Image (cartoon, rainbow, N blue to C red):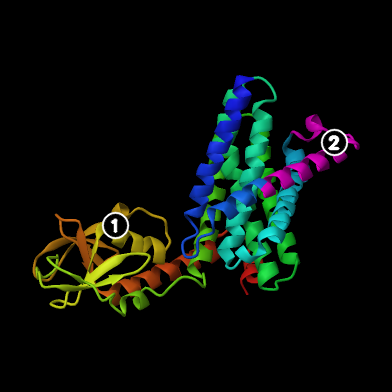
């Protein structure tokens, strides 16, 4: 009995942490945490009840757990049933908070919350169903939960396109089929002994594909501001005592403050100055690759012989100090190039076929 209560708290904690993590990908117009929590609860409960009802109905035809707990059952029953249940959970959530759906990323965010709710409730049932429940809870929390989210993000994407952009309902059907197939393959590998490594590789693959979908929606978000526009008008405040890491000028500098980052402009050399953290935010927000800044730092030599660290060849840091410098036009061009590359890679390397991409995007 003690573990039952413990599993409830562990599942709830994992749920809150994962909702916060999902929310971190909603960059430009963040959803209210309470709305996401509501989607997690309402969508999760709805989808689990629908799935349980569907399984009970199938048992009347002899399709019990023993019959479907294999590769074929995963592909033909478990995947379609559970993804359809999560789709209906999203339908319920949409009917309750439809005003919150105002960009493509929202479809993915709320579908992720529904899938998370489904998985957490399912984890609880599994963890308290028999022996080795402690191990099973940990396994399902860290393997099955991200898998459930990754299967379903494309459904949320298609649902938004259908409801807000007047795409045909066939778009949702196609997305449901893709999600069911992804889910079915995952469970088929899980039910087949000796495929644990392949299962983990497959999980990594679908998580990466889902992340690409989130990247795509962020790049085309109507709420994504132009980087240059944020640096056209100073805030009216002045920074004193800030030494330019490029030219060494300590003259007062105009500040540019917005909700994403803060910088100041050196009138002596024309560069903008920002902290390392602010430059990291610039590249994460305006070119959402989700990669660490340190991985992109490379040494470059200036024409005057100085050696500095460069981010994408457009922002620079001295070997010492926390401040960097950049020219707005150079960073803007690099951000655009990164985003164009993200879009190109998504279209060319996604698991979705070219025909389906055309249906989704055009």
Q: CA distance from mark 2 to mark 1?
A: 55 Å
Q: Disc 2 vs disc 1: which is toward the camera?
A: 1
Kindly state the secondary structure of the residue where label 2 is placed: loop
The answer to whether 269 appears left or right of 68 in the picture is left
- The front one of 191 and 13 is 13
Q: Which mark is residue 67?
A: none
Q: Residue placed at 31% from the left, 53% from the top?
A: 295
Residue denoted by label 2:
63
Residue denoted by label 1:
277
Q: Quadrant of residue 356?
A: bottom right
Q: Is residue 42 above or below residue 356?
A: above
The percent coordinates of residue 28 (x first, y second) are 47, 65
The answer to whether 213 appears left or right of 121 in the picture is left
Q: Is residue 139 visible to the viewer in this orientation of the structure?
A: no
Q: Quadrant of residue 124?
A: top right
Q: Is residue 280 above or below residue 330?
A: above
Which residue is the extreme one toward the bottom?
232
Q: Residue placed at 35% from the left, 74% from the top?
A: 230
The overriding secondary structure of the stretch rendered in magenta is helix
Kindly state the secondary structure of the residue where label 1 is placed: helix
Residue 176: in magenta span = no
**Tag 2–tag 1 contact (CB < 8 Å):** no
Q: What are the residue bounds of the magenta stretch?
A: 42-69
Q: Residue placed at 37% from the left, 70% from the top?
A: 335
The percent coordinates of residue 328 (x first, y second) are 28, 75
User: Badge 2 local density, few (<14 within 10 Å), some, or many (20+)?
Assistant: some
Quadrant that contains the N terminus = top right
């Amino acid at each position: 009995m003690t573990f039952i209560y413990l599993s409830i708290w562990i599942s709830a904690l994992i749920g809150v942490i994962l909702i916060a993590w999902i929310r971190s990908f909603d960059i430009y117009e963040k959803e209210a945490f309470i709305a996401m929590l509501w989607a997690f609860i309402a969508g999760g409960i709805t989808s689990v009840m629908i799935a349980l009802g569907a399984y009970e109905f199938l048992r009347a035809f002899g399709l019990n757990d023993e019959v479907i707990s294999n590769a074929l059952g995963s592909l033909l029953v478990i995947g379609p049933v559970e993804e359809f249940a999560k789709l209906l959970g999203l339908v319920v959530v949409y009917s309750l908070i439809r005003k919150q759906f105002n960009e493509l990323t929202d479809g993915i965010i709320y579908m992720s919350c529904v899938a998370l709710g489904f998985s957490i409730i399912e984890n609880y049932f599994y963890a308290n169903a028999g022996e080795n429940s402690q191990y099973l809870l940990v396994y399902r929390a860290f393997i099955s939960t991200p898998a459930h989210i990754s299967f379903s993000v494309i459904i949320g994407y298609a649902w938004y396109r259908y409801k807000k952009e007047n795409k045909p309902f066939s778009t949702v059907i196609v997305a449901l089929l893709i999600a069911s197939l992804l889910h079915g393959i995952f469970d088929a590998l899980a039910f087949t002994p000796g495929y644990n490594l392949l299962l983990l590789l497959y999980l990594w693959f679908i998580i990466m594909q889902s992340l690409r979908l989130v990247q795509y929606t962020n790049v085309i978000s109507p709420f994504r501001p132009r980087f240059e526009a944020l640096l056209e008008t100073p805030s009216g405040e002045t920074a004193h005592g800030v030494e330019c890491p490029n030219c060494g000028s300590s003259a007062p500098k105009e500040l540019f403050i917005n909700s994403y980052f803060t910088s100041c402009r050196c009138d002596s050399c024309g560069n903008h100055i920002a902290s390392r953290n602010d430059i990291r935010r610039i590249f994460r927000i305006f070119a959402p690759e989700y990669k660490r800044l340190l991985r992109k730092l490379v040494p470059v030599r200036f024409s005057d012989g100085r050696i500095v660290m460069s981010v994408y060849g457009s922002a620079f840091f001295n070997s010492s100090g926390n401040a960097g410098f950049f020219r707005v036009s150079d960073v803007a061009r690099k951000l655009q190039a990164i985003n164009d590359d993200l879009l190109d890679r998504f279209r060319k390397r996604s698991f979705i076929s070219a025909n389906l991409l055309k249906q989704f995007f055009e």
